[in-house]
């Protein structure tokens, strides 16, 4: 599976971390997908931290910038290597990998409603983790891509504060733009000239 690249569209370019006063639109794309997700209000997209852990984006609350560890969210898209790949198998593999790392973890699985072009969606909630309070992952499937929206809270207090941000602002801002990122990339290139 191929990893994606994230572009941040900003009115003002600021070196280092980007502090979100208005909601920045994040464009995530790969060979066969493009989607957007907004940076939640008062959250930072720390692209440097994302690169260190092989992600394209990594969001945490600006109020937590000096906190270690920070509760976080990220979005990622992974192009399917073949049409036979499906979300159910992908999620089962992800759960198995997670349980190998955290053998005492418990999880619940919820099938979610969806509309085209999303053809399947599942949410997994992990708890009883030794290094964080809870992790929730929303998996979405299109014909050619698996999309992952993830939220990890390191304390019950953070979970209570940020779970609604994940559901409403982060996941709620998700918009699938199609299977072909080329028109958007061409448009962005023409704006730079």
Image (tube, rainbow, N blue to C red):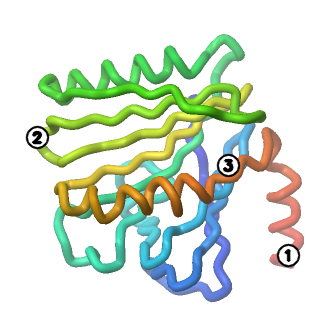
Q: Is residue 51 above or below residue 2?
A: below
Q: Please tell me which residue lies in front, 174 or 157.
A: 157
Q: Residue furthest top?
A: 84
10 Å crowding of disc 1: few (<14), some (14-19), many (20+): few
| Tags 2 and 1 touching, CB below 8 Å | no
**Residue placed at 44% from the left, 56% from the top?**
166
Q: Which comes sooner in the sequence, label 1 or label 3? A: 3
Q: Is residue 107 above or below residue 93?
A: below
Q: Which comes sooner in the sequence, label 2 or label 1? A: 2
Residue 36 horizontal/vertical position (percent): 67, 57
Q: In which image quadrant can residue 86 be found? A: top right
Which residue is the site of mark 1?
A: 191
* Residue 41 relative to residue 192: left or right: left
Which quadrant is the N terminus positioned in? top right
Q: Please tell me which residue lies in front, 10 or 15.
A: 10
Label total for image: 3
Q: Please tell me which residue lies in front, 77 or 119.
A: 119
Which residue is the site of mark 3?
A: 29
- Asked if residue 187 shows in the view, the reply is yes
| Tags 2 and 3 touching, CB below 8 Å | no
Residue mark closest to the camera, 2 vs 3:
2
**Local SS, label 1:** helix
Residue 117 horizontal/vertical position (percent): 76, 35
Gap between marks 2 and 3, in whole Å?
33 Å
Which residue is the site of mark 2?
A: 130
| Tags 1 and 3 touching, CB below 8 Å | no
**Residue placed at 33% from the left, 36% from the top?**
125
**Local SS, label 2:** loop
**Residue placed at 61% from the left, 16% from the top?**
85
Which quadrant is the C terminus positioned in? bottom right
Q: Is residue 22 above or below residue 73?
A: below
């Amino acid at each position: 599976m191929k990893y994606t690249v994230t572009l941040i569209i900003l009115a003002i370019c600021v070196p280092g971390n980007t502090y979100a006063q208005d909601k920045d639109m994040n464009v995530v794309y790969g060979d066969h997908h493009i989607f957007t997700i907004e940076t939640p209000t008062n959250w930072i997209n720390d692209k440097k931290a994302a690169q260190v852990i092989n992600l394209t984006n990594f969001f945490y609350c600006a109020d937590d910038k000096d906190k270690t560890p920070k509760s976080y969210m990220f979005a990622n898209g992974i192009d399917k290597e073949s049409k036979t790949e499906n979300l159910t198998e992908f999620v089962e593999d992800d759960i198995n990998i997670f349980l190998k790392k955290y053998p005492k973890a418990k999880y619940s699985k919820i099938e979610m409603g969806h509309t085209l072009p999303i053809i399947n969606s599942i949410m997994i909630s992990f708890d009883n983790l030794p290094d964080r309070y809870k992790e929730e992952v929303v998996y979405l499937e299109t014909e050619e891509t698996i999309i992952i929206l993830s939220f990890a809270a390191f304390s019950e207090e953070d979970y209570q504060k940020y779970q609604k941000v994940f559901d409403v602002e982060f996941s709620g801002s998700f918009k699938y733009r199609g299977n072909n990122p080329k028109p958007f990339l061409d448009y962005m290139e023409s704006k730079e000239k």
